[in-house]
Image (tube, rainbow, N blue to C red):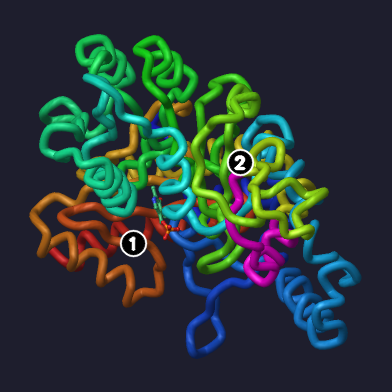
Amino acid sequence: MIASPLSLEDARARDAADPLRGLRSRFGLPRNDRGEPLLYLCGHSLGLMPLAARDEVAQELEDWERLGVIGHHSARRPWIPYQEALRPQIAQLVGCRDDEVVLMNSLTVNLHLMLASFYRPAGARRSILIEAGAFPSDRYAVISQLQWHGLDPRESLIELAAQPGEDVIREEAIESVLVRRGAQIALVLWPGVQYLTGQAFDLARIAAAARHAGAVIGFDLAHSVGNMPLMLGESEPDFAVWCSYKYLNAGPGAIAGCYVNARHFAEPGRQRLAGWWGHEMATRFEMTHDFRAAQGAPGFQVSNQSTLSTAPLIASLSIFREAGMARLRAKTLALSAFLGRLLAERTPELQPVTPPETAARGAQLSLRIDGGATRGRGVFSWLTQHEVVCDWREPDIIRVSHVPLYNSFEDVFNFAECLRRALRETE
Ligand SMILES: *Cc1c(COP(=O)(O)O)cnc(C)c1O
């Protein structure tokens, strides 16, 4: 028997059975001039606004207006300990102890701070290993750190590429380079989910291989946090960094996150670029001459924190708490499987770049448009004109994401239909 093609009714039936369907109404959905919602599939780039974020931000503005400096202690959420209530929730999302996480700065700044502490080239062990095609900001950060230490990136940066003809980088290849060149490698910086291909990695396996080679291991979780279930307590990297504006929906430029593994807390001599906010809380305001680091990840803070860029995260985390990561992950996989079937029916000529295995995927799907950049850009601009919000990465990749908090099976269905028409009408 030949199964009939999936229909809009199939999508609607899945939405009706979705226990998380009600969460969509808690987010602002971008709209066109006529007030109709766009087809938003770009949560991998900027998550949508939790409507409750407005009140959280307004509360800080009101308290500032009403209290001035007194708000540090007496705001409804006092500003000095503002993030204390959030750290356990963040720790739960990344799967670690509360004192191993801190909210501070933005992602690339945190990466630099962590590299300042953990990238300590010595003797022959000087190289940094990253994936080929890394997010440019990470690559710039790593190269400038090598140069900061007087090293030549042409010698000391190792970029591991996929096998010819493949897009995904196999964990075996990472293990193998760590065996072959391990004695040279001081630090491995690896993404949890690769931003371009959407490939999710086995982080425990990569961390174990790095440790075995004697290298420091840091993760960039920009595309993982709020997307994949994470267990840093099991993979135990030395450090990890992430932003909060992608799957964590905390708004453009929101406060970022940082993890430091507890085994580093006992090292009094751990180098860091210090500032007063990393000073131990009890004596921070005595304004003493000598820096004494706070226990745990908070000891890596530099400046006092922006409450306005943290407030929206409070609204988002409360939705995460309600939904639960297990249910979100189950919906991600259901959306992914549904989209996979739809595309196989409607656009069989398209090549998904993201690996098909569920463990290697989150909410993002990257699709290669054959026929060169001009064709690809044509398809992408057709989608844009038809109010599909996704993104385009040179030379030939369209990225979409189905975020379980606010995307529906109907969204995914509509996307597959649009893509089919886009391919046909731009031939
Ligand atoms: C989004 C993203 C960034 C952005 O860096 P900012 O410092 O937040 O501007 C950096 N690296 C990766 C891997 C990203 O996905």
Residue at the front extreme, as displayed: 289
Q: Is residue 363 visible?
A: no
- Point out the stretch of residues depicted in magenta: 300-316
Residue 204 appears left or right of 129: right
Q: Secondary structure at mark 2?
A: helix
Q: From what the image shows, is residue 304 above or below residue 270?
A: below
Q: Secondary structure at mark 1?
A: strand
Q: Residue at x 52, y 43 (%)?
A: 335
Residue 324 appears left or right of 159: right
Q: Residue at x 30, y 45 (%)?
A: 145
Q: Residue at x 38, y 62 (%)?
A: 390
Residue toward you, 315 or 423: 315
Q: Which residue carries the number 2 mark?
A: 331
- Quadrant of res 26: bottom right
Residue toward you, 232 or 110: 110
Q: Which residue carries the number 1 mark?
A: 391
The mark lying in front, picked from 1 and 2, is: 1
Residue type at mark 2: give it.
Answer: Lys
Crowding around mark 2 (Cα neighbors within 10 Å: few <14, some 14 to 19, many 20+) is many
Q: Say whether mark 1 is within 8 Å of ligand 1.
A: no
**Label at residue 412:** none
Which of pointers 1 and 2 lies earlier in the amino acid sequence? 2
Q: Is residue 261 visible?
A: yes
Q: From what the image shows, is residue 205 above or below residue 226?
A: above
